[in-house]
Image (cartoon, rainbow, N blue to C red):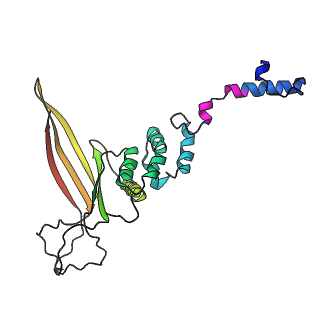
């Protein structure tokens, strides 16, 4: 060991047993992988440390941690924690939190309808001219090959409620699945077609388009499915 790396004070460095201890310490410090102890370098820190970082940044459970099913998604979510906290209470915050755990292209519809909480009586005495400003709905995009379980649905809704603003009420949610295929028509013509796009909703209700009379003669519990077809020529 060179004297320049000596950790000992000059007054004790002459003692052999202390000098040996100093040499051992230098070897141990030299062998340390510095990037492993710099825990805020999220891309390189050991996987074992990620859970503790998630706890520190309040990402466990409602923050989306349960939906981060790969190590990379966990790292991405931790790196975005400060930004997500800054944008809590906004549509951007909800979409970005979901994107970080693999749910891209989430659609959010605002002012979609009144809340069926018993405060309104549909007896024909009033008309409905628009949605309640505090209500919103969410459509999760499952893409071409993603599935969804009851547990994942509960986790997604927990994330939405965690990042929405306090005054807004989620009254409808659904899933959109797209099946995409490419058909070669000729050597220089190609058509990409989304040939089936199913959107299933839970909650919400009927559209206020004049086709239903709210006179108390029937009960409607909400929900429904829509099928759309979209063809894109390339």
Q: Is residue 211 above or below residue 233?
A: below
* Tally of numbered tags: 0
Q: Quadrant of the N terminus?
A: top right
Residue 148, x across and y down, in percent = 33, 50
Q: Is residue 105 above or below residue 20?
A: below
Q: Is residue 214 above or below residue 82?
A: below
Residue 100, x across and y down, in percent = 40, 44
Pick the front one: 151 or 222: 222
What span is in magenta?
28-37
Pick the front one: 143 or 5: 5
- Magenta stretch holds residue 105: no
Q: Is residue 105 above or below residue 46?
A: below
Q: Is residue 168 left or right of residue 79?
A: left
- Name the main secondary structure of what is drawn in magenta: helix
Q: Is residue 2 left or right of residue 15?
A: left
- Magenta stretch holds residue 32: yes
Residue at 24% across / 66% down in the picture? 131
Q: Quadrant of the C terminus?
A: top left
Judged from this view, the residue extending furthest toward the left is: 186
Q: Is residue 156 left or right of residue 112?
A: right
Residue 77, x across and y down, in percent = 45, 44
Residue at 52% across / 38% down in the picture? 42
Residue 146, x across and y down, in percent = 31, 44
Residue at 14% across / 46% down in the picture? 229
Quarter of the rendering containing residue 143? top left
């Amino acid at each position: 060991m060179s004297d320049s790396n000596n950790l000992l004070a000059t007054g004790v460095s002459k003692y052999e047993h202390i000098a040996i201890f100093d040499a051992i310490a230098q070897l141990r410090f030299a062998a340390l992988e510095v990037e492993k102890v710099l825990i805020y370098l999220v891309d390189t820190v050991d996987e074992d440390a990620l859970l503790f970082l998630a706890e520190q940044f309040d990402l466990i459970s409602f923050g989306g941690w349960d939906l981060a099913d790969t190590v990379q998604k966990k790292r991405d979510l931790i790196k975005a924690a400060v930004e997500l906290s800054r944008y809590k209470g906004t549509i951007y915050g909800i979409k970005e939190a979901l994107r970080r755990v693999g749910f891209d292209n989430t659609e959010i519809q605002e002012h979609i309808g009144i809340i069926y909480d018993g405060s309104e009586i549909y007896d024909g005495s009033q008309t409905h001219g628009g949605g309640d400003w505090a209500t919103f709905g969410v459509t999760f995009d499952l893409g071409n090959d993603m599935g969804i379980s009851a547990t994942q649905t509960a986790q997604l809704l927990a994330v939405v409620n965690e990042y929405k603003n306090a005054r807004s009420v989620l009254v409808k949610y659904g899933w959109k699945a797209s099946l995409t295929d490419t058909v070669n028509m000729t050597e220089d013509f190609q058509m990409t077609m989304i040939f089936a796009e199913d959107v299933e909703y839970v909650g919400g209700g009927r559209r206020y388009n004049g086709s239903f009379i709210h006179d108390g003669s029937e009960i409607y519990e909400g929900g429904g499915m829509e099928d759309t077809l979209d063809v894109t020529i390339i």
